[in-house]
């Protein structure tokens, strides 16, 4: 019964990780111009960035996406190992 909860949590964390990667790639491709897709990525990734900045306040803005991805990977590993 709990395996599906673990799978949903793992897939959700993977989705957030890919959203962060997608936002970074979109910034590289468009130069950071605002548009529909950029607003979509910003809406879903900014709360993650804020949580990371709250956890690790000493990080500079350029490092926050990488730190967020690392934290998500660590959480995915912990979820899979513990359960």
Image (cartoon, rainbow, N blue to C red):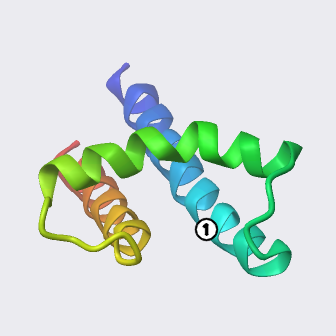
The residue positioned 14% from the left and 51% from the top of the image is: 55
The residue positioned 27% from the left and 44% from the top of the image is: 51
Task: Estimate the x, y position of residue 70 in percent, counting from the top left.
Answer: 32, 70
Total residue callouts: 1
Label 1 secondary element: helix
The residue positioned 74% from the left and 42% from the top of the image is: 39
Task: Estimate the x, y position of residue 74 in percent, counting from the top left.
Answer: 26, 63
Is residue 14 rendered to the left or right of residue 41? left
- State the residue lying farthest toward the front: 33
Residue 72 position (above or below residue 64): above
Q: Residues within 10 Å of mark 1 (few under 14, many from 20)?
A: some
The residue positioned 69% from the left and 64% from the top of the image is: 22
Task: Estimate the x, y position of residue 79 in percent, counting from the top left.
Answer: 26, 47
Which residue is identified by label 1?
Answer: 21
Residue 60 position (above or below residue 10): below
Task: Estimate the x, y position of residue 82 in percent, counting from the top left.
Answer: 16, 48
Q: Quadrant of residue 48?
A: top left
In the rendered image, which quarter contains the C terminus?
Answer: top left
In the rendered image, which quarter contains the N terminus?
Answer: top left
Q: Quadrant of residue 9?
A: top left
Is residue 8 rendered to the left or right of residue 25? left
Residue 48 position (above or below residue 9): below
Near-viewer residue (21 or 54): 54
- State the residue lying farthest toward the top: 1
Near-viewer residue (13 or 28): 28
């Amino acid at each position: 019964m709990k395996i599906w909860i673990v799978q949903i949590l793992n897939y959700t964390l993977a989705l957030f990780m890919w959203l962060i990667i997608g936002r970074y790639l979109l910034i590289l491709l468009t130069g950071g111009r605002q548009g529909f897709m950029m607003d979509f990525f910003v809406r879903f990734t900014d709360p993650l960035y804020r949580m990371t900045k709250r956890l690790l306040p000493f990080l500079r803005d350029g490092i926050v996406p990488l730190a967020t991805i690392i934290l998500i990977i660590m959480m995915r590993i912990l979820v899979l190992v513990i359960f």
